Image: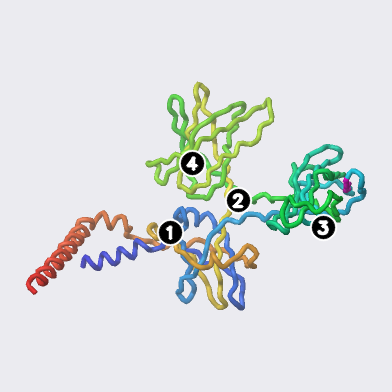
Amino acid sequence: MHYLIFIMAFGLIYAQPFSKEIIIPSVKKPSLMRVKLDQDIYRHTQQNYGDVRILSSNKQEIGYFITKVYPTTIIHQKKLKATTYKRETQTLIYTFKKPFLVEEIILDIKNRNFSTFVSVEIDGKKVIKDYNMFDYSYETGNQNFSVKLPSTKAKKVTITYNLKKTKFFSIYKYSFKKAPRPLRITSATFINREIPKITYDKTIIPLLEVNETKRVTHYLFKTNHLDIDHFRVNTMDKNYKREGSIYLSGDKKKWKYLRYFHIQNSTFTKLKVSNIKLKERKKYIKLSMVKKNNIPLKIESIEAFIHPNYLYFIADANQSYTLKFGGEYQTKPLYDLVMIVKKDTPFQEAVLSSLTEKKVEVKARDFFEVYKNILFTIGMLFAVGVLLYIALVLLKKEEA
């Protein structure tokens, strides 16, 4: 009887009481799907999503991975030929029709096996002086025809190289062929890189409770395991500068220190909005703010910024899929899919249905509390049995 109870409880330990149907578009062949995690999943999953499983309509477990999506850097570039070339001073001038943001310049140099030093002016202001460009094709194969510079909007760019410091060589770097001669530069490519901003989901989390001591005020918020990247404190107070500590907890009993933070406001000077980094999932966060001799801030809520997580999996034709989660003791699975999918792999968007909860009357924790004595006895009997078996084997060997 006790063995039967143990088996039933073991199943309950690994049960997943929550589920959502994954609604996918019609597919005729295996296709990569992407579905955005919602607040129900944050609320009821482990911190590393180790309890999440996907089951197909034919009861097979489906591989998946969960990741954040970061915007791809956009490269803007213009390739120009010199509008003016002054041979006597080795000066090339490049002119833009409209001001162009320049962060890097790549020269198209046809010469090989040389070393020179380049200076750059933007609209009459020198931004780079004596930057080494070289080509060691016959020696090491190394080459550098690019120069990075402070991000600057340019209408006219002047590039000059030092002819006296220009050296040509053959197999070995300083085995010079002949006297310095002008370089053959056919064009220049001007580059800047745009990193798009991350689009965050926003939500307002109201103050749960506040506790005050002589010098510190504790503000408690229930975040329900939201994957918060950062947050802002909402208060109507003006002209303050406060510092404090962030603590995290799953039960409001044991608190883990996360980091120091500070917030400030002034009607006299323009200040940036104070974004407080979090990047950890817990059920509760506590802001312990030092007030010194000041009146405590009247904090009403925090505005949380969530960097969305997406789940990827492969859907087959004529199959439906269910997302199951909420188990407390599962370990995170490892699937091959994360190694197969690349950034440019095409995918289709899927969506999640409303939450379905399956009631579980007996909790695994309750089971161990009730039957811990029986389990201990079974364990002891098993250990004694193993020892007796070893003793009998040894006795038979001695008799033989």
Q: Secondary structure at mark 3?
A: loop
| Residue 263 seen by the camera | yes
Q: Which residues are the magenta region?
A: 90-94
Q: Rounded to the nearest whole Å, what is the CA distance between mark 3 and mark 2?
A: 50 Å
Residue at the spot of label 4: 221
Relative vertical location of residue 243 with respect to residue 192 in this rendering, above or below: above
Residue at the spot of label 1: 326
Pointer 2: residues within 10 angstroms few (<14), some, or many (20+)? Answer: few
In the image, farthest residue toward the left: 399
Q: Which numbered disc, 4 or 3, marks the residue that appears first in the sequence?
A: 3
**Closer to the observer: label 4 or label 3?**
3
Residue at the spot of label 3: 110
Q: Answer with left or right where residue 107 lies relative to residue 386.
A: right
| Residue type of the residue flagged with mark 3 | Lys
Pointer 4: residues within 10 angstroms few (<14), some, or many (20+)? Answer: some
Residue 367 locus on image (x, y percent): 28, 58
Q: Is residue 221 magenta?
A: no
Relative vertical location of residue 60 with respect to residue 11 in this rendering, above or below: below
Q: Secondary structure at mark 4?
A: strand
